[in-house]
Image (tube, rainbow, N blue to C red):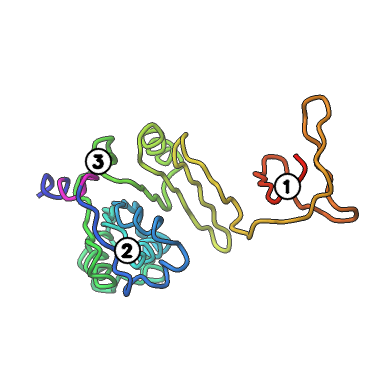
């Protein structure tokens, strides 16, 4: 069974068409390119307390290629306060969090296969099956160990946790990842008066009393330039 599941998660499978009726809202917001990348992504979610369950739910509804969950911890009574997939009978039966969560998570989107990782350890070979690994509520040393493995590969790493009203998230998408839009805000535009050259460097002058709002490192594009 493990070998068959591993074959299902290979990256080089044929690309599947996106159901535009099912994911119409996401297509409008994210665009086809982002949706195609999501549809080709096998995601591993490690840790299924309240935060992990919420992440797994959102990823399942987003329409990724597959989700694998891993949390062998037996369900406790305290889990019922935050983990909405778990039931009182899961506590009495001593079920694992991932085993109890899987069938209920799978009901949210029948187009996304939901699996339980049956391996006992997160090794390099196991992690290499996935394009994204999401860890929640993990010990710091374990986060570092997993991130060291994924950093040198094509696997994206995300670690998140919540502490009461406060939360944190860490992303490592590899050394070649480029963020073209760090804020999500609309591009700034403005009028310029002149472009001059001084000592080999260009000097751009904007309209008086007008803030351009730019910062060091911003990408600037000039249009309708005359007289160059």
Q: Quadrant of the C terminus?
A: top right
Circle 3 residues within 10 Å: few <14, some 14–19, many ≥20: few
Q: Secondary structure at mark 2?
A: loop
Whether residues under marks 3 and 2 lie with C-beta atoms below 8 angstroms apart, the answer is no
Residue at the spot 90% in from the left edge and 55% down from the top edge: 209
Whether residue 44 appears in magenta in the rendering, the answer is no
What x and y, as percent, mark residue 84? 36, 72
Q: CA distance from mark 3 to mark 2?
A: 22 Å
Q: Would you name the residue on which mark 1 appears?
A: 225
Q: Which mark is residue 126?
A: 3
* Chief secondary structure of the magenta portion: loop
What x and y, as percent, mark residue 78? 39, 66
Which span is picked out in magenta?
7-12
What x and y, as percent, mark residue 75? 29, 63
Taking the image as shown, residue 111 lies to the left or right of residue 167, namely left
Location of residue 197 (image quadrant): top right
201, above or below 69, in the image? above
140 or 89: nearer the viewer: 140
Q: Secondary structure at mark 1?
A: loop
Badge nearest the viewer, 3 or 2: 2
Q: Which mark is residue 63?
A: 2
Q: Secondary structure at mark 3?
A: helix
Residue found at the very far top of the displayed protein? 199
Q: Which mark is residue 89?
A: none
């Amino acid at each position: 069974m493990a070998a068959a599941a591993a074959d299902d998660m290979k990256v080089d499978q044929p690309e599947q068409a996106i159901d535009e009726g099912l994911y119409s809202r996401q297509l409008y917001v994210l665009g086809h390119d982002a949706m195609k990348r999501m549809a080709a992504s096998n995601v591993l979610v490690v840790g299924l307390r309240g935060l992990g369950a919420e992440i797994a739910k959102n990823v399942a509804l987003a329409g990724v290629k597959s989700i694998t969950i891993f949390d062998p911890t037996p369900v406790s009574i305290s889990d019922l306060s935050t983990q909405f997939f778990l039931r009182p009978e899961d506590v009495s039966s001593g079920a694992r969090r991932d085993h109890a969560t899987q069938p209920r998570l799978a009901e949210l989107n029948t187009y996304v296969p939901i699996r339980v990782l049956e391996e006992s350890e997160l090794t390099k070979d196991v992690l290499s099956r996935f394009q994204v690994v999401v860890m929640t509520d993990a010990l710091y040393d374990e986060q570092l160990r997993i991130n060291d493995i994924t950093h040198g590969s094509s696997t994206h790493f995300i670690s998140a946790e919540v502490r009461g009203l406060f939360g944190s998230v860490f992303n490592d998408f590899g050394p070649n990842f480029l963020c073209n839009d760090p804020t999500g805000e609309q591009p700034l535009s403005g009028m310029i008066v002149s472009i001059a050259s001084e000592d080999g460097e260009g000097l751009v002058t904007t309209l008086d009393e007008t803030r351009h709002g730019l910062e060091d490192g911003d990408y600037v594009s000039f249009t309708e330039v005359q007289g160059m």
